[in-house]
Amino acid sequence: MGSHPAVKNAVTSHRQRRLRAGVFVAILTLVLAACGTGGAQDGLSPASERASNIDGLFRLTLIIAIVVFVLVQAAIIYTSFKFRRKKGEEPRPVKQIHGNTKLEIAWTIAPAIILAGLAVPTVQTIFENAEEPVDALEITVTGHQWWWEYEYTDLGVVTANEMHIPVGQDIALTLTADAGDVIHSFWVPRLSGKRDLVPGHENTLTISADEVGLFLGQCAEFCGLSHANMRLRVYAHEPADFDAWVESQLAPATVVEDSEGWELFVNKGCTACHAIDGTEAEGGGLNPGPNLTHFAQRDTFAGALYDSTEENLSAWLANPSELKSMRPDLNRGMPNLGLSDDEIATLVAFLQGLS
Ligand SMILES: [Cu+2]
């Protein structure tokens, strides 16, 4: 016939406590999971000199912060035990005090000295990382809502989202965005620092990789609807492999200009937004999309969000906005072109033939 109210309360609060403990453990697990090192986007395992400089500065700051933390916590614990109310004492201390000028001056000056000290290696790192790159490969990076365009200015290669670089060489990036776009930020934590791409303005950033591998990054400046879907990849190769990649990028597009795929590509208006070098597909316009000349050489598409599989590409052509939030009505992103299943299959085969 229902339990006593007090018993019921005890049961509820016990449950609540267990629930709270469960939530706490879940959150702690998530936070700790984020601390693992060695990830492809982990600034704590730098793979270049500049990223190492930043990492070193972070570690120095962290050590100082830990010392400060331990000292402050120790002082708090010490005072709360030492000056706690003992049995039989008045709730309000008999002797009232107000402030301590010497202590206050000390804890104002001490942080100021620590910060002034930290400023020295900080400024040093900023200058070191801003040093002119030597013998650099030049790439212009243009941030678009919501994908990356790379132009290898000396080599004549244009590609999207996936950057290929040789190991052990400085890569001089010129970072910009089109007028009318918004600010983006280029960040590959293992290869260098972070730098903004500002519409109508050019910033520079030097990156490099000491080892062969795939390094991940993403847009680090909130840039609207698909900011979180604006990812990027940097593939670092041995110089010979990089040269081979450049060669394959410079080869003419493998387009058969009277094929069914090509006809559809032209008739459905893909050519208006997408360039295929060496054909009449020039791209550009109000809402340019990635250069597709060697699209089949890319592992991923749509801001490095999806693997370039037949299934994903079919879904993309059927309704791009379902795979990635975009606003084609505002000239941001790829519109739904109302393609039939047959047309999609033909176009996917065409895209996968662009090697
Ligand atoms: Cu962005």
Image: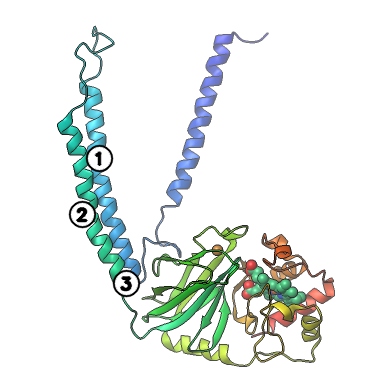
Q: CA distance from mark 1 to mark 3?
A: 32 Å
Q: Is mark 1 within 8 Å of ligand 1?
A: no
Q: Amino acid at mark 3?
A: Glu
Viewer can see residue 348: no
Q: Amino acid at mark 2?
A: Gly
Secondary element under disc 3, as helix, strand or loop, is helix
Q: Label for residue 49?
A: 3
Q: How many residues crowd mark 2 within 10 Å: few (<14), some (14–19), many (20+)? A: few
Residue ID for mark 2: 117
Residue ID for mark 1: 70
Q: Report the front residue among 60 and 354.
A: 60
Q: CA distance from mark 1 to mark 2?
A: 19 Å
The C terminus: image quadrant: bottom right
**Residue 120 x, y percent position in the rendering:** 22, 60
Image position of 41 (left or right of 11): left
Residue 257 lies, with reference to residue 6, above or below; the image says: below
Disc nearest the viewer among 2 and 3: 2
**Residue 85 x, y percent position in the rendering:** 25, 15
The answer to which of marks 1 and 3 sits earlier in the sequence is 3
Viewer can see residue 316: yes
Secondary element under disc 2, as helix, strand or loop, is helix
